[in-house]
Image (cartoon, grey):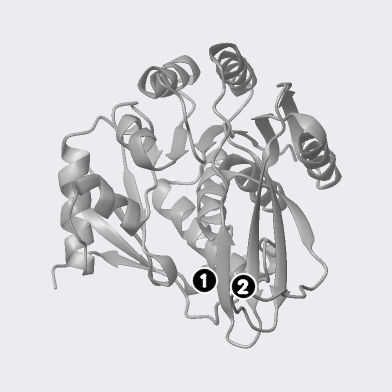
Amino acid sequence: MSRSRVVTLTFSPALDVATSVDVITPSRKLRCDAPRHEPGGGGINVARVAQRLGADAVAVAPLGGDRGRRVAEQLGKEGVTVEQVIVDHTIRQSFAVTEESTGRQFRFVMPPQRLDRDEADRCVKATCDLASAARCVVVSGSIDLPDVVEVLRCIVQTVRPVPVLIDTSGDALDAALDSGAALIKPSARELADLVGRPLDTESDITAAATDVIARSNVDALLVSIGAGGAVLVRPDVPPLRFRAPTVRVRSTIGAGDSLVAGIATGLADGQELVDAVRLGIAAGTATVLTDGTQLCDPAMVDELLPLVAVDVAVDD
């Protein structure tokens, strides 16, 4: 049976490094365990998980320097097709350190390299060209472009009717709300930043998401709330609350990307949005069970999927 194609675009890829140390203290040399290197950046992680879940994943990314070549090679080994947009600069490197004595995780994310207009245009063109054979397109990760509103609109309009999912933050998240995308996925913290007020309860989150989607032109807003699951808000439809299975969290790295990957894979396979979100919740939960920068085990996703509950979101 043919695999449904998912195309992802990452404007700010990274080489992620994860390690651990017994105790983190200032002013001392901290002897770390052997590091683990993984391809990173929102859309790249989405492609990696989508491939594991059975999609034919294609990752578009500007990959320059030795780090870029290493990311491309590792993605190829995982079966992900790489559409490498060659750039002159190397990609960023981010790292995470787990304090073994407490289980706390410290994440250090370097700023993205801003693409020039030609580099950004080549990324967009590659994505749109590949979308002609795709069932879902994902734009995920940091976006540092001066014309981000026009870029996101261009992608959505060019690939239509293929659904576009966008997962970003800051000014790019605000721009995404005017893109016409099929789904935008902010976290609860990102939504709070967007509306400029604290969101302390699920009712606060649902009300804020409802207000935001009313002034947008996107089809759906999915707000992730960490271990609790997510809230789905759509125009003229009652909001839905997705509850994730309770598990012991080992690392949250890649959980949000796994959530998006599950949704993209489900939509590409022809699932309704609610079922696709359930798959995403299972994938995100499976990822938090892994160490460091590792991503979900497909067998664990299958095990967790029946445990994802869905009900109508209600006021507190």
Q: Give the label on residue 110, or none.
A: none
Instruction: Find the residue positioned furthest to the top.
Output: 118
Secondary structure beneath disc 1? helix
Question: How far from the left and from the top, in percent, is residue 142?
Answer: 49, 39
Q: Amino acid at mark 1?
A: Pro
Instruction: Find the residue positioned furthest to the front.
Output: 27
Q: Give the label on residue 306, or none.
A: 1
Would residue 312 be found to the left or right of residue 66 on screen? Answer: left
Q: How far is mark 1 from mark 2, CA to CA?
A: 7 Å
Question: What is the quadrant of residue 314 in the picture?
Answer: bottom left
Residue that mark 2 sits on = 303
Question: How far from the left and from the top, in percent, is residue 71?
Answer: 77, 41
- Residues at badges 1 and 2 in contact (C-beta under 8 Å)? yes
Question: What is the quadrant of residue 77 in the picture?
Answer: top right
232 up-or-down from 107: above or below? above
Question: How far from the left and from the top, in percent, is residue 259?
Answer: 51, 55
Would residue 170 be found to the left or right of residue 286 on screen? Answer: left
Would residue 42 be found to the left or right of residue 175 on screen? Answer: right
149 up-or-down from 223: above or below? above
Exactly how many numbered labels are in the figure? 2
Instruction: Find the residue positioned furthest to the bottom.
Output: 101
Question: What is the quadrant of residue 114 in the picture?
Answer: top right
- The quarter in which the C terminus is drawn is bottom left
10 up-or-down from 20: above or below? above
Q: Residues within 10 Å of mark 2 (few under 14, many from 20)?
A: few
Residue under the point 38% across and 31% down:
181
Residue under the point 67% across and 76% down:
28
Residue under the point 22% across and 40% down:
213
Q: Amino acid at mark 2?
A: Glu
Evaluate whether residue 143 shows in this view: yes
Residue 63 or residue 151, whichever sits in front: 63
Secondary structure beneath disc 2? helix
